[in-house]
Image (cartoon, rainbow, N blue to C red):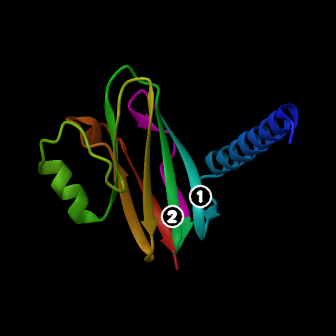
Amino acid sequence: MRWYKRGAIAALVAIVTAFGGYAMNTTAHAQASSDFGPGLVTINVGIRYSKFSISTLHVREGTVVRFLVHNADPIHHEFIVGDASVHLRHELGTEATHPPVPGEVSIAPEDVGETFYDFDTAGKFLFACHLPGHFAYGMKGWVIVDG
């Protein structure tokens, strides 16, 4: 195959991938109150003025959510999602940053963080920022998992 045909095919694949991912991310962000899943879903979460852009997210049981957390603030934040024991550990902990653990990510100022979480059981899961004062200020929300 000639070099220009390979280049054209590569460019076409890049364009389709970019627009396909953009459409999925935009839909997920715009309709965060809709039920998503099952399967892999990307959700964009914005942070501005120490507030999350969504307060409640509904997903179906068996959904793996890829959270892209966009920190537009000039300060650090974190995004922690999980059950009560996960949040208790973070409320009492002194972790400055979070390793790549499912459901936990630290986000630098004006940066984007990524984490995945598998919602495999029905229930209500908290997401929050536990940096000093942030949770009390209202940096929290819920993921409702419908069976």
Which residue is the extreme one toward the top?
74
Mark 1 sits on what residue?
A: 41
Q: Which residue is located at x 33 percent, y 34 percent?
A: 77
| Residue at x-position 42% and y-position 73% | 123
Q: Which residue is mark 2?
A: 64
51 shown above or below 27: above
Nearest to the observer: residue 62 or residue 125? 62
Looking at the picture, tell me which residue is in the foreground, 53 or 108.
108
Asked where in the image residue 33 lies, by quadrant, the reply is bottom right
* Depth check, front residue: 115 or 128: 115
The part of the chain drawn in magenta is 47-58
Residue 99: in magenta span: no
Q: Circles 2 and 1: CB distance less than 8 Å? A: yes
Q: Amino acid at mark 2?
A: Val
- At label 1, the amino acid type is Val
Q: Position of residue 8 (x, y in %)?
A: 85, 35
The mark tally for this picture is 2
The question of residue 55 being in magenta is answered with: yes
- Residue in the picture at 60% in, 52% down: 32
The 10 Å Cα crowd at callout 2, few under 14, some 14 to 19, many 20 or more, is: many
